[in-house]
């Protein structure tokens, strides 16, 4: 079975720019969640997509948006980048949106905003 | 604001020692409790998902218990090995919050050979 893959692995952007991060879910998984992990913090939930619709959102501003495609892969888009957006962005897929399904994580995208 | 707390923040043990750490969470609206292991340069790996009060789960030398009434879970590692060195994260799925996961900051374990 194919695991969760994220691209790119590293990215450097300038404040004010826009970025798109990509995630391919594990085969058979229909739910994708995105997390931000800043230095010294635990993962912070950004949002979750289930069958192409947003199914929950954390405390992130609207400039954080996402998509899920018919093959259940997903994108995270961040507009008007700020310095504080520098973090590791993790994508995780699961069998469903219910909170008792274990998450399968990708290796993350390290975003640096200068 | 719901808070998931893990203690200790970090731990150093010798190879062969047994160790345990704690995840504390608000007991109201409990839905599930997750444990993950995150090794450096790898992605987090699911260890356990626990849903029932009194649940005990085991995976090799690692086991976990759950008390939903008092709001805590313990993770035990028997006979620690250097390859157990990692950050151990717990996350609460809260029924009152669309079951989204709320994460602790983790316990960083270093096992010295």
Image (spheres, grey):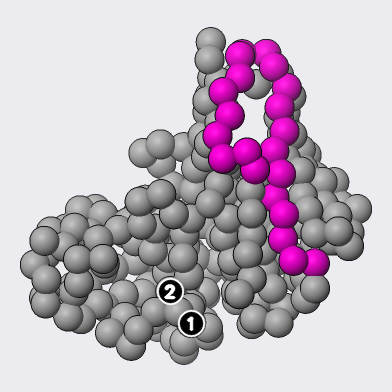
Residues shaded magenta: B7-27
Residue sitting nearer the eye, A15 or B48 = A15
Question: Relative to residue A35, is residue B64 depicted above or below?
Answer: above
Where is residue B64 shown, x and y percent of the image? Answer: 77, 43
Mark linked to residue B75: none
| Residue ID for mark 1 | A57
Q: Is residue A53 left or right of residue A98?
A: left
Confirm whether residue B57 shows in the render: yes
Q: Residue at x 42, y 69 (%)?
A: A34
What residue lies at 72% left-to-right and 33% top-to-bottom? B20
First reached walking from the N terminus: tag 2 or tag 1 = 2
Confirm or deny contact between disc 2 and disc 1 (CB under 8 A).
yes
Q: Residues within 10 Å of mark 1 (few under 14, many from 20)?
A: some
Is A59 on the left-hand or right-hand side of A15?
right
Q: Is residue A8 visible?
A: no
The answer for which chain carries disc 2 is: A
Whether residue B29 is situated above or below residue B70 in the rendered picture? below
* Residue A58 horizontal side relative to residue A71, left or right: right
* Mark 1 secondary-structure assignment: strand
In front: B27, or A92? B27
Residue placed under numbered mark 2 in the picture: A46
Which residue occupies the foreground of this view, B3 or B16?
B3
Secondary structure found at label 2: strand
Magenta stretch containing residue B10, yes or no? yes
Per the image, is B38 magenta? no
Q: Position of residue A64 (x, y in %)?
A: 31, 80
Position of A113 relative to B72 (above/below): below
Q: Is residue A34 above or below residue A64?
A: above
Residue A22: where, in percent of width, then height? Answer: 29, 68
Question: Left or right: where does residue A17 sit relative to residue A78?
Answer: left
Q: Quadrant of residue B7?
A: top right
State which chain disc 1 sits on: A
């Amino acid at each position: 079975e194919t695991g969760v893959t994220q691209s790119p692995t590293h990215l450097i952007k300038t404040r004010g720019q826009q970025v798109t991060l990509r995630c391919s879910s594990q085969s058979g998984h229909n739910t994708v969640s995105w997390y931000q992990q800043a230095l010294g913090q635990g993962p912070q939930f950004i949002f979750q997509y289930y069958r192409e619709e947003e199914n929950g959102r954390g405390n992130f501003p609207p400039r954080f948006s996402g998509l899920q495609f018919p093959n259940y892969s997903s994108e995270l888009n961040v507009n008007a980048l700020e310095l504080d957006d520098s973090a590791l962005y993790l994508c995780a897929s699961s069998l469903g949106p219910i909170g008792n399904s274990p998450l399968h994580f990708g290796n993350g995208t390290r975003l640096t905003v200068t | 604001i719901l808070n998931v707390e893990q203690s200790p923040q970090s731990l150093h043990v010798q190879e062969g020692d047994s160790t345990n750490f704690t995840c504390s969470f608000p007991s109201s609206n409990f839905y599930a409790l997750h444990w993950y292991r995150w090794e450096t340069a790898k992605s987090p790996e699911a260890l356990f998902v626990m849903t029932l009060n009194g649940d005990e789960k085991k995976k090799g030398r690692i086991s976990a218990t759950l008390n939903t009434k008092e709001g805590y879970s313990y993770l035990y590692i028997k006979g620690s090995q250097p390859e157990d060195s990692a950050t151990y994260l717990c996350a609460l799925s809260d029924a009152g919050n669309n079951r989204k996961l709320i994460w602790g900051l983790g316990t960083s374990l270093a096992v010295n050979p």
